[in-house]
Image (tube, rainbow, N blue to C red):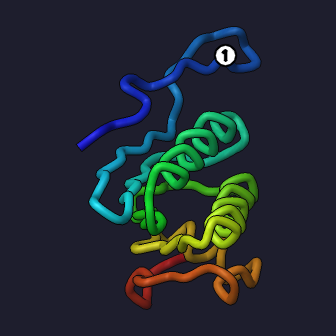
Amino acid sequence: MTSLPDRLPVTEYAGGAVQPSVVSVVFEPGPQRVLARVSGEIDMDDADGLRGDLVSALESSPDGMDVDLSAVTFCDTTGLHILLDLHRLALEAGKSLVLTALSRPVARLLRVSGVQQVLTVRAWPPAGGAD
């Protein structure tokens, strides 16, 4: 199992304080597909690094990528754009992108935006509870 990045990147916030990034991804390469387990908060502060890591993993995989988003605690439209970009890149390369699990915040974002009609989602969070 490979974890990218090896350590959490550091992000400088408006107050000048340096704090660790709040999103991380662990990759589990397989013979045909890569599994990416994303956790934390996906927002524009960390989007470029996350996008770059996910695109690299997709490009290195022969058939595509599975993305587990069950540990994502927050996702704004920046995360939505990353998923849509990955989907487009996968299709252009003759690969597939599958969301294997969603947290409630991600599921809500996909439903509200209508993107669940475009992306392949294997497992939604259980019904009930607050979205």
Q: Residue at x 29, y 39 (%)?
A: 2
Label 1, residues with CA under 10 Å away: few <14, some 14-19, many ≥20: few
| 34 vs 6, nearest the viewer | 34
Q: Quadrant of residue 116?
A: bottom right
Q: Residue at x 40, y 83 (%)?
A: 123
Q: In the image, is 79 to the left or to the right of 71?
A: right
In the rendered view, would you say 53 is above or below 88? above
| 127 vs 62, nearest the viewer | 62
Q: Position of residue 109 (x, y in %)?
A: 66, 72
Q: Position of residue 41 (x, y in %)?
A: 54, 47
Q: Residue at x 42, y 67 (%)?
A: 66
SS of the residue at dot 1? strand
| 106 vs 64, nearest the viewer | 64
Q: Which residue position is annotated with label 1?
A: 12
Number of numbered discs overlaid on the protein picture? 1
Q: Position of residue 3 (x, y in %)?
A: 33, 37
In the rendered view, would you say 63 is above or below 27? below
Give the farthest residue toward the left. 1
Residue type at numbered disc 1: Glu
Q: Quadrant of residue 43?
A: top right
Q: Quadrant of residue 51?
A: top right
Q: In the image, is 1 to the left or to the right of 5?
A: left
Query: The N terminus lies in which quarter of the figure?
Result: top left
Q: In the image, is 125 to the left or to the right of 95?
A: left
Q: Position of residue 12 (x, y in %)?
A: 66, 16
Query: The C terminus lies in which quarter of the figure?
Result: bottom right
Q: Residue at x 50, y 82 (%)?
A: 121
